[in-house]
Image (cartoon, rainbow, N blue to C red):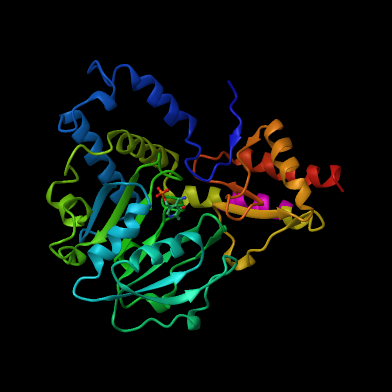
Amino acid sequence: MKRPYNFSAGPSMLPEPVLETIQAELMDYRGLGCSVMELNHRSDAFEEILHGLEARIRRLLKVPEDYAVLFCPGGGRMQFSMVPLNLLGAGVSASYVVTGTWSKGAANEAARFARVHVAYHGNGTKLPDEEMLDIPEDASYVYYCDNETVHGIEFPEPPAAMVGIPVACDMSSNFMSRPFDVSRYGLVWAGTQKNFGIAGLAVVIVRRDLLGLASPEVPTMLNYDTYVRTGNLPNTPPVTQIYVANLMAQWIEKEGGLDVMNTRAIERSSMVYDALDACPHMYATKVDPKARSRMNVTFRLRDEMLTDVFVKEAAEAGFINLAGHRTVGGIRASLYNAMPIEGAAGLSSFIRTFALRHA
Ligand code: PMP
């Protein structure tokens, strides 16, 4: 069966070999007579999955030894709370670079626990210049979102001005899509439902000297130390999410690793941006070209009446889930690790022919 190309922003497409493995292992995981979802989380088989996932993340990202890799339930938003609750330490202030919906959400949640200094407040179309960032010395950490999923803006690399105090970064929508230097960060976290699996799990990579700072009132399950102390088994963990992330990590390794993921991401997104740039009478792209995301390509039909027509005709042509985020409208094509180059090429020619047909 040929499936349509799925441009959903998350939960999003999984590679077919990963889906096929899940299907093949569903009734009987490796002769154990049950699926991973029915297996005790302290069994040897599940521990092998858990340790395999950590080892693969460490290999793929070359995670230094002085960083812990944690698997936290609660998806992305739980980290909006866990980051300040754990990183504030004795301090009271944290600095947030607000570039779009998700960094704004994180800053709002942090304001419940901290004095939030806003180092930059953008409108979702561009990134700050280095000199626009003034980060107060008393901030316990500075936080930013590497790829704003709703607006489709992505940092080419972390701003240098931030280096010097612990940098906390939300990489939910571009984690495992390119290599990065973990040692530049105090903490990186990512929900897994875009490039690395399914919803409900966050991977947290944290420098060990930033552990142990949470105050005693912080709930046990919101304290990173709990996950370190228990070897990522503080309770029954989200076993399915961990299992699927491990399959994704194996798939990424088999495909050639993070440089390959990055090359493909650039190729896919360039195809779509090129098509949009070739038809400026039909499509408007608001994002500053320097900040264009490799993951989420956002644009609008100049004639807003054509937005629904575009989404409908695209679906009929085999390109599904292209409507923009409910808060901003327009179109959003999410191009994560699992999207084949053919999917991006197909969407790119659909964009061109749609412009001709509706000219
Ligand atoms: N951060 C980013 C960059 C996201 O894209 C999302 C979800 N789309 C979140 C945080 C929130 O994740 P969750 O829905 O798992 O809480």
Dominant SS type (magenta): helix
Residue at point 55%, 40% (across, down): 339
Which is more toward the observer, 287 or 100? 100
Say if residue 285 shows up in the picture. yes
- Residue 21, by quadrant, is top left
User: Residue 328: x and y, percent?
Assistant: 61, 55
Q: Is residue 270 magenta?
A: yes
User: Residue 143: x and y, percent?
Assistant: 37, 68
Residue at point 16%, 56% (across, down): 225
- Residue 273, by quadrant, is bottom right
Q: Is residue 52 magenta?
A: no
User: Residue 235: x and y, percent?
Assistant: 17, 40
Q: Residue at the far front: name it.
A: 112
Q: Quadrant of the N terminus?
A: top right
- Left/right placement of residue 157 relative to residue 238 reads right
Residue at point 27%, 48% (across, down): 72
- Left/right placement of residue 225 relative to residue 150 reads left
- Compared with 197, 64 (above or below) is below
- Compared with 173, 169 (above or below) is below
Segment tinted magenta in the rendering: 266-275
- Left/right placement of residue 109 relative to residue 294 reads left
Say if residue 63 shows up in the picture. no
Count all numbered tags in the image, as a single digit. Answer: 0
User: Residue 159: x and y, percent?
Assistant: 44, 73
- Left/right placement of residue 118 relative to residue 306 reads left
- Compared with 121, 18 (above or below) is above
